[in-house]
Amino acid sequence: MGALTHLFYPWGLFLQAAAIIHFIRRRPDTYWLYIILFLGPIGALVYFFAEVLPDAGLLNQSFKGISRGKRIKALELAILDNPSAGNFEELGELLMESGNLQSARNAFDKAIAARSTTLETFYHRGVCAILLGDATAALADIEKVVSKDPNHDFYRAGGLLAQAYALTGQKERSEAQFRQVTGPSTLSETYLNFADLLASEGRTVEARQWAQKVLDKEPTMPRYLRRRERPWSRRARKTLKQLPA
C-alpha cells in the first residue's frame, strides 16, 4: 500500500482531497470517509467510481443553469415590451428552478394579474409561498389546484395542501388530507410532514412509524433514486432521533 501511495504522489493527495470535498457536499454513507482516509489514493479512486461518476449529471445541470440564466435575462427584457401572462409564467418557472423563490412568486403574481388561468401557475405560486413560510397565502392556491386535480404533481399538491392546513392550525383537516393522500402517494416529503403533524400532537408512536416508512423504502430503491432521496432519509433519521422510542 505504501508503494502504491508513493507511486501516486502527489496526485493521490489531490484525489483524496477531491473525494473528501465531494463527500462533504453530497453526504453519502459514512463508511466512504473511512475508505478514503485509510485506503489512501486507492480508496479515493474506488469512491470516485462508486459515487462521483454517477454524479456526472450534476455537470450537465450546471450548464443548464447557465442557459437558464441567459433565458431569464432575455425574458426580463422581453417583458418590458410584452408583459404577457405567458412571459411571466415562463419567467416564474425558471426563477423557481434556480431557487429564487421570492422573485418566482412575484412573477406568478404578475402572470395571474395578467389573467393567467393555467392551473400550474397557481400551483407554482402556492409552492413558492409555502416554501417561503407563508402557508396562509399558499392555502388558497393549492386548494384551487387540488379541487380540480386531486393527483396533481403525483399527489404532491395534496400533500402540500395537508401541510398548509397543519401550518395554519387546521390540524383535523390536515390529518384527514394526509390520510387521504398517503394512500396513493409514497412521497417521502408527505410522509415526513405527516410525521411532524403527529409529533406536534404528542402521537410519537405514529410519528415514528411514518418517518420509518421513508427509510423502509431504501432497500428496494435503485441506486440513483437512493441518491436523490438522501436529504429525506437524513431528515427521517433526524426525526427518529428526536422522538422518544
Image: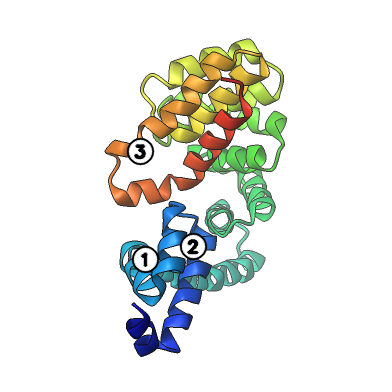
Query: Looking at the picture, which amino acid does disc 2 mark?
Result: Phe
**Disc 2 + disc 3, Cβ < 8 Å:** no
Label 2 SS: helix
Estimate the spatial distance between the alpha carbons at disc 3 and disc 1, rounded to whole Å. Answer: 20 Å
- Sequence order check, earlier mark of 3 and 1: 1
Q: Which mark is residue 7?
A: none
Q: Nearer the viewer, residue 207 or 81?
A: 207
Residue 145 in sight in this render: no
The residue at 53%/61% (across/down) is 25
209 relative position to 114: left or right: left
The residue at 35%/89% (across/down) is 7
Q: Write down the residue under mark 3.
A: 218
Nearer the camera: disc 2 or disc 3:
2
Q: Residue furthest front?
A: 2
Query: Looking at the picture, which amino acid does disc 3 mark?
Result: Glu
Q: Write down the residue under mark 2.
A: 23
- Sequence order check, earlier mark of 2 and 3: 2
Label 1 SS: helix
Estimate the spatial distance between the alpha carbons at disc 2 and disc 1, rounded to whole Å. Answer: 9 Å
* Quadrant placement of the N terminus: bottom left
**Disc 2 + disc 1, Cβ < 8 Å:** yes
